[in-house]
Image (spheres, rainbow, N blue to C red):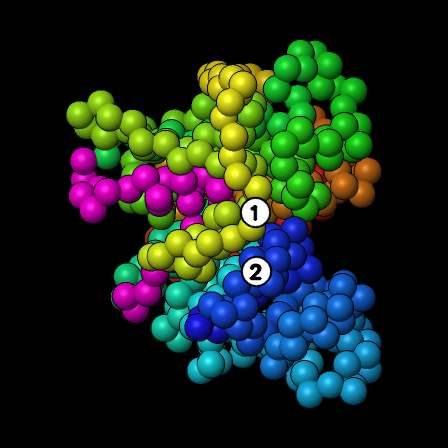
Amino acid sequence: MKTITILGSTGSVGRQTLDVVRHSKDQLKVYALAADKNVKLMEEQARAFRPAVAVMMNDGAARELQGRLADTPIKVMQGMDGIINTVIAQEVDTVVTAISGRIGLEPTLSALEAGKAIALANKETLVAGGDLVMAKAKAMNRPIIPVDSEHSAVFQCLEENPETIETIILTASGGPFFSKPKEELENVTLENALRHPNWSMGAKITIDSATMMNKGLEVIEAHHLFTMDYDHIEVLIHPQSIVHSMVQYRDGSVLAQLGKPDMRLPIQYALSYPTRWKNPFERLDLRGKTLTFFEPDVKKFPALALAYEAGRRGGTLPAVMNAANEAAVSAFLERKITYLKIHELVEKVCSEHDVLDHPELGSILDADTWARQRISELI
């Protein structure tokens, strides 16, 4: 029996994690749930899974939840302090970091320091502070098991001798605009960008998928997770989202992991590793399927090239790019800027940043704050 804390339980990955728990009651127990401000859903989850602790980042939401759960023994906590308490608790074996954005960095470091295993669904954690996180994991000898479908695929394809890997090939669906001419992107609406062809995800990651910044973030994440040089990490557009990623070895052999576009599969694998649990989820049927692969168009999706550039430069630049992107996407979701303005703003903020090499946590957080403020000023 593994006892878990789920950060971001009301989000898309968090909800699917609880679905995995629902089908794995003999293997998993929930110690704590944490979310931002969706009180109604958090109450439903808390009553269904009976965690010892429920955390809301928003102070008002925490007070409301406390009133709603007054008839239960569930302890309600608030803010980052509450989240940190749930990830370092003695009862917890594994922390599922499904919380969205750079905010996942601090609890991930705290969980590793406390000797917890990490099921990582928060790619921004490694983008902003990958060197710190991987160093902490190595120092504490604790595993970071990827939950992103692409990185889970790579992880499952790895052999015991990773030094024989030649290339990591991350696949991308291409999002809703893969076949749309570049000239037509000027007229993209919020509704267009939120209409992903294959995956059901949260709003922020769906927009990132449309711009392909999501794949850029995953390239940086793969660099840290698998200690792979950027020159040996490739991206291929695979519209069917069946081959989740591939690993090519130096003898030319290519191993691929295939599955339906269902996040519950990599979530369960991260929680069951090194074993595999049976589940009732729909199986992949390849009969009649056609699998196609294409080179990404970086002129139409310049965010991918920008992410490679930021990753190669390193220091505080990936954190700045990530923060600027989070702020710009938020503005787009609030209809304050156009779709094409997202990349324009992020690229400008990155070009203005004075990169600090080998940053500690404080410097990363300062760079993050500066980027968000700069985006606000430019808007």
Question: Left or right of 20: which side holds 115?
Answer: left
Q: Quadrant of residue 46?
A: bottom right
Residue 273 located left or right of residue 80: left
How would you rate the neighbour count of disc 1 (Cα within 10 Å): few for under 14, some for 14-19, many for 20 or more? few
* Residues shaded magenta: 140-164
Residue placed most toward the observer, 317 or 99? 99
Work out which quarter of the rendered image holds the C terminus and state it.
Answer: top right
Rate crowding at label 2 as few (under 14), some (14 to 19) or many (20 or more) other CA atoms within 10 Å. Answer: some
Report the amino acid beneath label 1.
Phe
Whether the magenta-drawn stretch holds residue 163 is answered as: yes
Residue 204 appears anywhere in the view? no
The answer to whether the residues at label 2 and label 1 have Cβ atoms under 8 Å apart is yes
Residue that label 1 marks:
281
Element on which disc 1 rests: loop
The amino acid marked with disc number 2 is His
**Residue 1 image point, x, y percent:** 44, 73
In front here: 308 or 234?
234
- At 68% from the left and 46% from the top, the residue drawn is 202
Location of residue 167 with respect to 135 vertically, above or below: above
Q: Residue at x 44, y 27 (%)?
A: 235
Residue 164 horizontal/vertical position (percent): 18, 35
Name the image quarter holding residue 299: top right
Q: Quick check: 354 above or below 235?
A: below
Residue 23 is tagged as 2
Q: Say which label, 2 or 1, has the lower sequence index.
A: 2
Which residue is found at the position 61% from the left and 19% from the top?
A: 178
Residue sitting at x 70%, y 68%: 45
The image shows residue 199, relative to residue 112, as above or below, that is above
Q: Camera-side residue: 274 or 327?
A: 274
Q: Which mark is residue 78?
A: none
Residue 64 in view (yes/no): yes
> Foreground: 182 or 289?
289
